[in-house]
Amino acid sequence: MADAQEPQISRNPDVDRRESGLTINRASKVFRSAEGKEVHAIDDVSLAICRGEFFVMLGPSGCGKTTLLRSIAGLETLDAGEIYLDDRKIDDLPPYERPVNTVFQSYALFPHMTVEQNIAFGLEMEHKPRKVIRKAVSDMLDLVHLSDIGARHPDQLSGGQQQRVALARALAKSPEVLLLDESLSALDFKLRRQMQVELKRIQRETGVTFVFVTHDQEEALSMADRIAVFSNGRPEQVGTPEQIYDEPVNRFVADFIGDINFIDGVKGRGDSVVLESSTFPVQQDLANLSEGEQVCVAVRPEHITLSAPGGGGLQGSITWLTFMGAHVRCSVRLDDGTELMARLAPSSFDVELRPEAKVTVVIGSEHMRVVER
């Protein structure tokens, strides 16, 4: 593919302009609350999403992720900013002219139509030839593994089957971008896990750019190529699941993604931190911090090990523990009162685990992450 010609627009220099894909440039959207106050649903957001990427917008309710998704679809109008697909400006196009399609949480299947008729509907509205429609419907049924139920109606389908039909209908029109708004949230836990795998498979097989909105951290980590973690109308961090989990940029991201411990301390000499009275080197550049400055250190529970008291490390005592089969969940209260949670594999400790037992908390420097307070 030839390199795309860069459009002559003013772009946020912090955004990496991709060779092709979906670019959101300084997008803003303000609503007014019932009390008349301005609510910045989208606050100067700039993102670059690669073509063929599974991109997840993750965050709590009210953080702006769904408003941004609806703005890409054309269901909301931006107050400021631009949306480009490759070099085409699409934010001023009506929804039906944008090469995107949306799968909503409710699926929105037509109850009086069969599965095949639901999938064919969009193509019929575009007056495609019958031969083309039949082939597209057949291909979509094969893609979502529903070839044997094309004659059924939605009320004869399970939740997972309805979800697949909604996906097939959205993909039948060959959109360049598929938008998915909390589209697995109506499924039960087991089926949701299965559909996460299926959704990723479908995205890889079609090569369509997927932009997926969710508040479920595990869902985001399991499916995304990259994740944007949203808070208060803007992304706090954008990165791969591994980067988001292992290298959170601030306390909000660290706390929102998975279980986490926070330990207050101070900056030591060089790239080190002092926790209680012990100094720990960290594998992180702390040149922007002054020696003695207060810091917050984040540590995942699975990166904590316990040993006999008195060794090098943080001193404390076990407050409770729970056997979970493959691991033991354990809470330790440090001598300064800080509570830490550990997730211990059978081979990760050499001390008897029992309530009130004195222990040393051992944390490898590679697993300590200094985050903004």
Image (tube, helix red, strand yellow):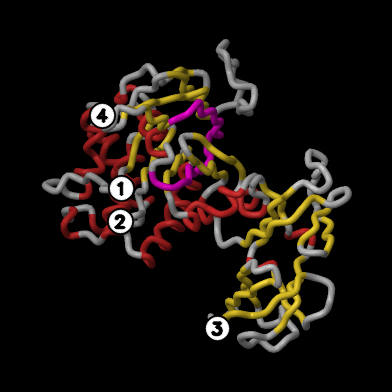
Q: Quadrant of residue 118?
A: top left
The answer to the question of whether label 3 and label 4 lie on touching residues, with beta carbons closer than 8 A, is no
Coordinates of residue 29 in the picture (x, y in percent): 40, 26
For disc 3, the marked residue is 323
Q: Secondary structure at mark 3?
A: strand
Q: Residue at x 34, y 46 (%)?
A: 167
Q: Secondary structure at mark 4?
A: loop
Badge 1 is on which residue? Answer: 105
Magenta part of the protein: which range?
42-61
| Vertical placement of residue 28 versus 141, above or below | above
**Residue at 80% across, 70% down:** 313
Say what amino acid the circle numbered 3 marks: Phe
Along the line of sight, the residue nearer the viewer: 76 or 140: 76
Mark 1 lies on a secondary structure that is loop
User: Which mark lies nearer to you, 1 or 4?
Assistant: 1
Where's residue 328, x and y in %?
59, 80
197 vs 316, nearest the viewer: 316
Marks 1 and 2 close (CB-CB < 8 Å): yes
User: What is the secondary structure assignment of the residue under circle 2?
Assistant: loop
Q: Write down the residue under mark 2.
A: 186
Are there few (<14), some (14-19), or many (20+) residues within 10 Å of tag 2? some
Percent x, y of residue 26: 51, 23
Q: Residue flagged by tag 2: what amino acid is it?
A: Ala
Left or right position of 343 against 27: right
